[in-house]
Each structure stands twice: as structure tokens, then as C-alpha cells.
Image: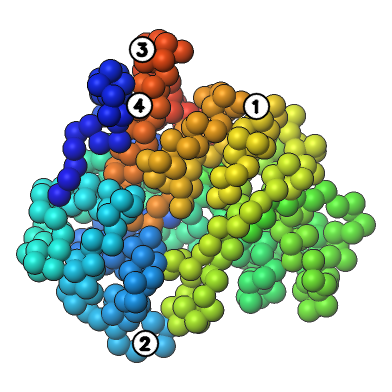
Amino acid sequence: MSLHPDRFFSGDHQTRSAARDIYESVADLPIISPHGHTDPAWFAENRPFPDAASLFLTPDHYVLRMLFSQGLTYDVLGVPRRDGKPVADGRTAWQRFAANYHLFLGTPSRTWIDHSLRWAFGIDETLSAETADRIFDTINRKLTEPGLLPLAILEKAKVETIATTEFALDPLVHHQALRQQGRIGLVRTTYRPDDVTDPDSPAFAANIARLSEITGEDTASWSGLIAAHRKRRALFREFGATATDHAAPTAMTADLPECDKQPLLDRLLSGRAETEDAELFRAQMITEMAMLSLEDGMVLQFHAGSRRNTDPVLMAERGPNLGADIPVRVDPVRGLESLLQKFGRSPGFRMIFFCLDESVLARELAPMAGYWPALMLGPPWWFHDSPRGIARYLDQVVESAGFHNLAGFNDDTRALLSIPARHDVWRRAVSDFLARMVTASTLGPSDARALARWLSYDAAKAAYKLPA
């Protein structure tokens, strides 16, 4: 297993030395994980993970999509089916994964998994067909130890706070248990209302009706719908939420006149929607969420540029978030225009924008963040959350946006053990980027260390309005 102590640093001796110095100043900082998709049940129940496959393989869409691209079926990889038909057991799935581990050479998945195997289990062997059973058994044996329970993993990783993400209709039962345990703050929720703001969801109308039931508001009326969101947001804040999260295939926002809002909702709920109505509703709801953020102070996260569930067979057989989402182009200047013209100057409003379309970083997003007070840029997301993706991002945005219009780093992961690995990659990539500025004499060593701390820790706390 190759985990060189100077990985991701420049090959130039002077730059590598500077990067090492900067990295050492931030390597042991606590982790702020302000946005992600870990399961709150892990922390509320604090039970051992079942086995190695359930920890590293079946929940990780990065891993699944690569293996599927090389002809391994989701049945063979042990991913549960909706119809309940049998799939491979954990050991068999792990053996297939291990035999094909070479497919991940050069990918961030390989970095994260190798880091996790060593960091959590002390495993130095490379995963392969020959080592598969031995590593599987070692992991399974150690998973029963107290030091590898979910809360112990957070402590070992020096996680200061971690945010999960729940839909608007979620009953938050695990966060209720966490509150009883006094752990709200260590673990906090995030309000993601896509289940009631995306008309392309087959359950949209039913979800709107359910929102009415749990809030007591008439969600068939526009004012009642917004009032229902206001109530749900207030409840989520009781469980530590400081942010909302919204996903859309485009960056479009809208600012409809009041007279057009109710007819739009009526068309969607009655089944008479026109072709463009779904996108228009999503666009208007982003602006409505910004208005509510101005009221309650919650930070608005906007993830744009992914076409979700592009494989209908996979979606029907097993559900979402299994690797079939694909990046698409976005137009942030035109898309965000309505929202920024309305709220971009508002002191109480903050939006963190994430984008999968790298072509707009330097041309549009960095200049936009370098102008609008309300706009911050989220770190490289999803397909670009990698050493080179981070380097490209910093190179494209810093000269126009500066460092202080960036929201630091969030790991945005579903895999618990990848959290320390991902933050380590970010800190190393940031250190290398700053070291190149030091050796080019455009930045002093003390300023570089201060910026490394900002990007690795302080920026995320500030961007997400987390307590000091």
C-alpha cells in the first residue's frame, strides 16, 4: 500500500519542503464537517458496523460505478434489491471488489480507502484477490472493538461537528435521540426540502399533502406552502441545523410576480403542468428559500449541475445514489441572476454555491463570488473532490475571488471512514498550492500557514455560521 508522507506535494525540493511545513501546521486541526450524508442512526445508536463490505463497498457510489463500468453487476457487489431477490453476501462481494481493486489506481477512491484501511485498522497490505479474505476478517474482527464504534471514530478523527442531511418530511427520530444524549452540536441536521420542491419526483403531490399534514398548513396554497417550510426549518434548527441544502440540474432561479405563483402550484398539483413548469417551480423555490434564510439566518447551499438517476433500470431495481448521476453544464450568471439581484446585497443572507461544471469556475463563478457579498463558493464537489480537482479549483478561483470568498472544505460523503481521508487530501492539496505561491515569492510563509488554517478549519465554521 502506497501512502507516501509527502503525497500530493510537488516534486520540486524547495516547494515540497514548504508544503511539508504548511501541512504540518494544519494536519492535526479538528475536523469541521458541515455538510454530508452520513446516517444519523450510526451516531444515535452507536452500534458496530456489520462487516467490511457494508462499510467500504455497498454504500459507496464512487466504488460501485467504477466496478459496474467494468462489467460487475450490482447483484455480484451485494447491493440490495427493491424486490428482495438475493444478492451476493458480504464476503463474496468483498472478494470481487478486492480482485478488481487495481481499477482504482489513480482515483481518489483508492486514496480514501487506502487511508481508511491504515488509519482505522492498521492495515498496510494492498487489497487484492490474495489478501481479500485476510483483510475482510481483520476488519470484521476489529469492528467489534469499542474504538471503532461510530462515536469513537468521530473522536479519533477529531471531528468537532458533523452535519447530516435530512429531507423536509423526515421525522428526525435519530436526532431526537441525539438530543436526549446531549450530542446535538457534535451531530446536527441540515434541511433538504427536495422531496417537496422537485416536481419531477413521482411522489411530489403526495409529499406536498404530507407536508400539510405534519405542519397543519394548507400546502395547496402558495402562502401555506411557504408557511409550512418556515415551520419545518424552525424544527430543524432545534436539532442544530444552520444550513439548508438544495439540488437541481441547473442553476436557474426565478422571481415570479405574486399573481403567477399560485397558478404554477395549481398546475403542478392538478397534473396539468406544462413542460417548463417543473424547472420554474424549482427555480422559484430556491428564491423562496433565500427569503426564508434572510428571516432565520440559515445558510443556503445550492448544488447545481447533476442529472440524477440516468439509468432507469438501476433506479427501478435498487433506487437512487448508486452511481448513475452525471454532471451537466450550468449557466450561473443567468441562472443566479434573479436570486442575486433580489438578495445578493442582503447582509443577513449567505449562499454557498457548488458546481460540477469546471468550465464556469474562472470565467463566471469566481468573478461573481468576488463581487456579490452574499455568494460564497463551495469546494470541489463529487467528481472533482480529488487532489487534482482541488488544485484546478484553487487555480481557477483564487485570483478573482480571493481565499476569503471560499467556504473552506466539506467532505459531502456517505462513507464515515472517508471523512478523515478526504480532509487530509484537502489539507495536503491546499498546502501544496500555497507552497507554490511561497516559492514563487508571491506569499510569505506565515501568511501561507494562516491561509492553510483558514481553508482547513476556520472558513467552514464562518461560512456555515457555526458556534465559535
Q: Secondary structure at mark 3?
A: helix
Q: Secondary structure at mark 4?
A: helix
| Separation of residues labelled 4 and 3 (CA atoms) | 11 Å
From the image, state whether disc 1 or disc 2 is nearer to you: 1
Q: What residue is disc 4 on?
A: 431
Q: Which mark is residue 370?
A: 1
Q: Secondary structure at mark 1?
A: loop
Q: Are marks 3 and 2 in contact (CB under 8 Å)?
A: no
Other residues around mark 4 within 10 Å, as few (<14) / some (14–19) / many (≥20): many
N-term mark: 4 or 1: 1
From the image, state whether disc 3 or disc 2 is nearer to you: 3
N-term mark: 3 or 2: 2
Q: Is residue 30 above or below residue 177?
A: above
Pinpoint residue 4: horizontal percent, then vertical percent: 18, 37
N-term mark: 4 or 3: 4
Q: What residue is disc 2 on?
A: 84
N-term mark: 3 or 1: 1
Pinpoint residue 297: horizontal percent, then vertical percent: 63, 37
| Separation of residues labelled 3 and 1 (CA atoms) | 25 Å
Q: What residue is disc 3 on?
A: 445
